[in-house]
């Protein structure tokens, strides 16, 4: 019996034909007892699966590349935000305060323009005390506050972060020589937070009411000592007023 499918019929109607690969497989496979057409179907399915896997792998590779690019973009944006400049108004304020400090008008204040910091020096605070001496309080209220408030009014993106620090508390030391109202028996973090609050109240009272001042206490831990070789140095009992400018997203 002829296994080759017929070609065109005498009536002119074209019967279904089989492609050459299927025809060759049919002719060669029969003597071996193998169904060549089924085998060809499997091979074609396998080829299609390989193609699909290739496409899927390419898409996954592209997705990983796109994800990596997205991560790099986010990190770069975060880095740019972390280095957000404080703006001209803040620099103008820092320059004015630095000039006052050079003239000797701010004996209790150190200005660090490169870091955007106005520092109330540690000697302003007695040990275990969160109170500011009257001369320091007057210095902040009459000289520092107007300059900072002027900068805040001129730049609505500016705000202040007031950070308090402390020296390392040593149990069994000499008794404190401060007023009972100023004595703090709390941990370093709480003591430094109270110091920050006192400075914020003196140097930026109006901005604090407007919610543009954030006060926090860092205590003496987390590498916050200014003089690490002398943990009990008065210089460690400082408060930093940091000018911060909100980034534009």
Image (cartoon, rainbow, N blue to C red):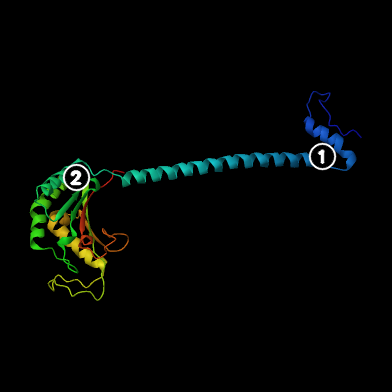
Of the residues under marks 1 and 2, which one precedes in the sequence?
1
State which mark lies toward you, 1 or 2.
Answer: 2
Among all residues in the image, which is located at the extreme front? 229
Q: Nearer the viewer, residue 90 or 61?
A: 90
* Element type at mark 2: helix
Quadrant location of the C terminus in the rendered image: top left
Count neighbours of disc 1 (C-alpha within 10 A) and say few if under 14, some if 14 to 19, many if 20 or more.
some
Residue 236: x, y in percent? 23, 61
* Element type at mark 1: helix
Q: Residue at position x 15%, y 61% from top?
A: 124
Count neighbours of disc 2 (C-alpha within 10 A) and say few if under 14, some if 14 to 19, many if 20 or more.
many
The residue where tag 1 is placed is 36
Quadrant location of the N terminus in the rendered image: top right
Tell me: 43 left or right of 237: right
The residue where tag 2 is placed is 90
Residue 62: x, y in percent? 53, 40
The answer to whether residue 97 is visible is yes
77 is higher (above) or lower (below) than 176:
above
The quadrant where residue 190 appears: bottom left
Residue 13: x, y in percent? 78, 26
Q: Residue at position x 58%, y 40% from top?
A: 58
Real-space CA distance between mark 1 and mark 2, rounded to the nearest whole angstrom: 84 Å
The quadrant where residue 188 appears: bottom left
The quadrant where residue 223 appears: bottom left
Do residues under tags 1 and 2 come within 8 Å of each other at their CB atoms? no
The answer to whether residue 17 is visible is no
Tell me: 105 left or right of 16: left
**Number of the label disc, if any, that sits on residue 125:** none
Q: Residue at position x 84%, y 36% from top?
A: 26
Tell me: 75 left or right of 201: right
């Amino acid at each position: 019996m002829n296994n080759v499918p017929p070609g065109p019929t005498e009536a002119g109607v074209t019967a279904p034909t089989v492609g050459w690969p299927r025809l060759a497989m049919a002719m060669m496979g029969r003597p071996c007892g193998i169904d060549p057409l089924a085998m060809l179907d499997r091979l074609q399915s396998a080829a299609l699966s390989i193609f699909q896997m290739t496409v899927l792998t390419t898409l996954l590779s592209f997705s990983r590349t796109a994800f990596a690019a997205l991560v790099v973009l986010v990190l770069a944006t975060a880095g740019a935000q972390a280095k957000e400049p404080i703006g001209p108004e803040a620099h103008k304020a820092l320059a004015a305060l630095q000039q006052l400090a050079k003239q000797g008008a701010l004996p209790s204040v150190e200005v660090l323009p490169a870091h955007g910091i106005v520092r109330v020096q540690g000697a302003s605070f007695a040990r275990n005390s969160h109170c500011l001496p009257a001369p320091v309080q007057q210095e902040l209220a009459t000289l520092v506050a107007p300059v900072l408030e002027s900068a805040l009014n001129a730049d609505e993106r500016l705000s202040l972060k007031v950070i308090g620090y402390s020296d390392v508390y040593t149990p069994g030391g000499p008794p404190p020589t401060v007023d009972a109202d100023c004595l703090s028996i709390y941990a370093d973090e709480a003591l430094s937070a109270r110091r920050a609050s006192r400075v914020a109240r003196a140097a930026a009272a109006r901005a604090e009411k407007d919610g543009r001042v954030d006060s926090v206490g860092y205590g003496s831990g987390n590498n916050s000592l200014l003089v690490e070789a002398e943990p009990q140095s008065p210089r460690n009992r400082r408060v930093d007023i940091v000018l911060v400018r909100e980034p534009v997203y």
